[in-house]
Image (cartoon, rainbow, N blue to C red):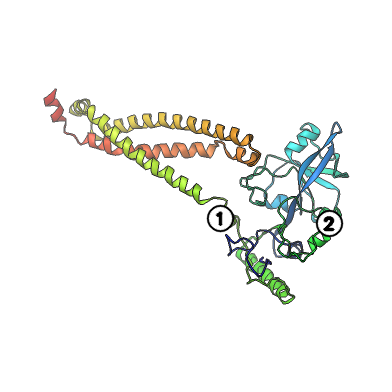
Amino acid sequence: MDDWDPEGPAYPERPQLPPPQMTYMDATYLAASDVPLRKVIMYPVNGVVSGGADGGRAFKTRTRITTGDFFEMFDVPFQYGGGWTAQADAGAQNVIVLSRALNARLFGGASGVGQTIRWNDREFRVIGVLGEWHPLPRFYDMNTGPFDDPEDAYIPWGWGRVLAQLTSGTLRCWNTAEATDTFEQVAASSCAWIQMWVELPDARARERMQTVLDAYWSQQHAAGRFQRPRNNRLTNVEQWLRDQEIVQDDNRMLVRLAFAFLVVCLINTAGLLLAKFLKGAPASGIRRALGASRAQIFIQHIVEAGILAAGGCIVGLLLSAAGLWGLRALYANSTETGSGYAGFSHVDSATLVWALVLTVVTTFLAGSYPAWRIGRVPPTVYLKSQ
């Protein structure tokens, strides 16, 4: 929702879009709607954790203050335990969910569910431990880095107001006349700092939610807010990534150049195979004279091209793995990109499957014409020469 400065958009480079975050008052009002199947309002904070199996020293940890639907909405896996209910959000119950890495640090990998730790000098009972979960990009909150790792601790929404805990992420304010020294002042201001997601199972639910947004906009506009043109949007994840320009134009250009280079390689490969097959044409002619069919000659040369392509595929995968290893090492030593980029640079099963499929397709494309050409050569030409 666009509650930004009437004099200009939140981001001049994307003037058609509203701010990517919401104000506290707007998010909490809309979160009370019963239209969505699930809804999440949240923001990141810094915390200090202590306790665990050995009662070790306190250390900083990135934490997310969120509503309980977070885990189900984003399909977050649990290794032990689970999340909390809406009652825990309203009552600011002393419960906490840990990441797998934080649980291993505090409890040596054993289940910490039921144990008590201290977060920001308050006792919290561990009710869940996440499994392996590294969404890339981290679409649900890209304000502090789309390829950063998820937070290590999660606590109920109500603790934000109880502890007067402001965000450690992005907080943008356009109205300098508003006081923003305390949590209550920021919560009542036009500053955007809350991320909000809703789960709408069908088109009817989407229409109803859009009606809720528009009705709220009209009410607030009449009260003096939302002075920019109405710009209420319900954006799915795919469109959200496009709007936030996670995939840049230079990345798309690199993909196009890669496929253009592939086409050039295919043309060169076809020429080299044709020259190689023509050089061995006398042997093919003798096989034809001895009874081999054109189809058999074609299959022979396609198999030969396939063997060469398989070797090229293996070498290419090894070179790709070496390049990705180098990228991981580069990002691991970088303080600006974070560990998320390192996790993004890896070879997975889908990559291997696509490499094999591309090998088969390109082998057929590059080898079919040379193989067909050899099969069409009359065997009598080579018998006379022999």
Task: Give SS at disc 2.
Answer: helix
Position in image of residue 171 (x %, y %) = 72, 56
- Using the image, determine if residue 59 lies above or below residue 209: above
The quadrant of the picture occupied by the N terminus is bottom right
Which one is earlier in the sequence, the residue at label 1 or at label 2? 2
Extreme residue in the top direction: 386
What is the secondary structure assignment of the residue under circle 1?
helix
Residue labelled with disc 2: 161
Q: Position of residue 165 (x, y in %)?
A: 81, 53
Label count reads: 2
Residue 319 appears left or right of 293: right
**Residue 42 image point, x, y percent:** 74, 54
- Going by the numbered disc 1, the residue's amino acid type is Arg
Image spot of residue 74 (x, y percent): 67, 50
Using the rendered view, name the quadrant where residue 199 is placed. Answer: bottom right
Nearest the viewer among 79 and 147 is 147
For the point 50% across and 33% down, the residue is: 320
Residue that numbered label 1 is attached to: 242
With respect to residue 14, does 325 lie above or below? Answer: above
Work out which residue is located at the far front of the displayed protein and give it.
176
Q: Is residue 367 visible?
A: no
Label 2: how many residues lie within 10 Å, few (<14), some (14-19) or many (20+)?
Answer: few
Residue 263 visible here: yes
